[in-house]
Image: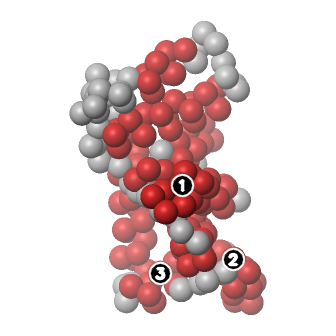
Amino acid sequence: MFSSVSSMLNTAEKRRLPLWKVILEDDCQERGAGMEDSLRKMNSLWQAMKSAAKNYSPQTRSSSGLSGGDGAKMRSLCPKASVGGKFIDSIIAEALSMGESNACMKRIVAAPTAGSCGVLPAVMIPLAERDGIDDNTIVDSLFVAAGFGQVIACRASISGAEGGCQAEIGTASAMTAAALV
């Protein structure tokens, strides 16, 4: 398990491998799994993210009644009034939808926590759709995101209860940024 970003980068450079592959190999070693198994697991997480986005229902409300429908409101406003352009608007709508799905007890992917479940897919799903990025490339980038999340978890708390919103959302944002590079 990597405990620093520099150790991940140094290993990738020394072995002349892409960063995602070094992290994949580390995952395989840590879990005692084969590469195909690890790739299959990450692909299933990516498919679950896409499925959660596809299955969002604007009619569903949380048990408290406080959450639900805002993702759909954002989507309906996008053509009329833009917050930051079409792509940024789609990210905002996706993040709201994913967070609402979590609050409504729908299936989400904790990345790294349930509270931050909307950050990574909110960027990766619209990016893949806009740029025509294939699933295998996204899965590779999710390994990089996971590697960065692992380093953060080794060095700090990723728990919202312990570290507040920044622990969850900050970690998810760093993971997303790493996936994009």
Q: Earlier in the sequence, mark 1 or mark 2?
A: 2
Residue type at mark 2 is Val
Residue type at mark 1 is Gly
| Label disc, if present, on residue 164 of the rendered structure | 1
Q: Nearer the viewer, mark 3 or mark 1?
A: 1
Residue 77 vs residue 68: left or right?
Answer: right
Near mark 3 (Cα within 10 A), the count class, few <14, some 14-19 or many ≥20, is many
Return the x and y of residue 134 as percentages of the image width and height.
53, 52
SS at mark 1 in the image:
helix
> What is the residue that sits farthest to the left in this orientation?
63
Name the residue located 60 percent from the left edge and 54 percent from the top edge: 166
Q: Nearer the viewer, mark 3 or mark 2?
A: 2
SS at mark 3 in the image:
helix
Query: Which residue in the protein does label 2 denote?
Result: 5
Query: Which residue in the protein does label 3 denote?
Result: 27
Residue 86 versus residue 99: which sits nearer the camera? 99
Residue 12 versus residue 101: which sits nearer the camera? 101
Residue 13 versus residue 150: which sits nearer the camera? 150
Near mark 1 (Cα within 10 A), the count class, few <14, some 14-19 or many ≥20, is few
Residue type at mark 3 is Asp
In this picture, is 126 found above or below 86? Answer: below
Return the x and y of residue 141 as percentages of the image width and height.
58, 62
Could you give the CA–CA distance between mark 3 and mark 1, rounded to whole angstroms?
A: 28 Å
In this picture, is 66 found above or below 126? Answer: above
Residue 163 visible to an observer of this rendering? yes
Q: Earlier in the sequence, mark 3 or mark 1?
A: 3
Return the x and y of residue 146 as percentages of the image width and height.
53, 68
SS at mark 2 in the image:
helix
Name the residue located 42 percent from the left edge and 40 percent from the top edge: 98
Could you give the CA–CA distance between mark 1 and mark 2, rounded to whole angstroms?
A: 23 Å
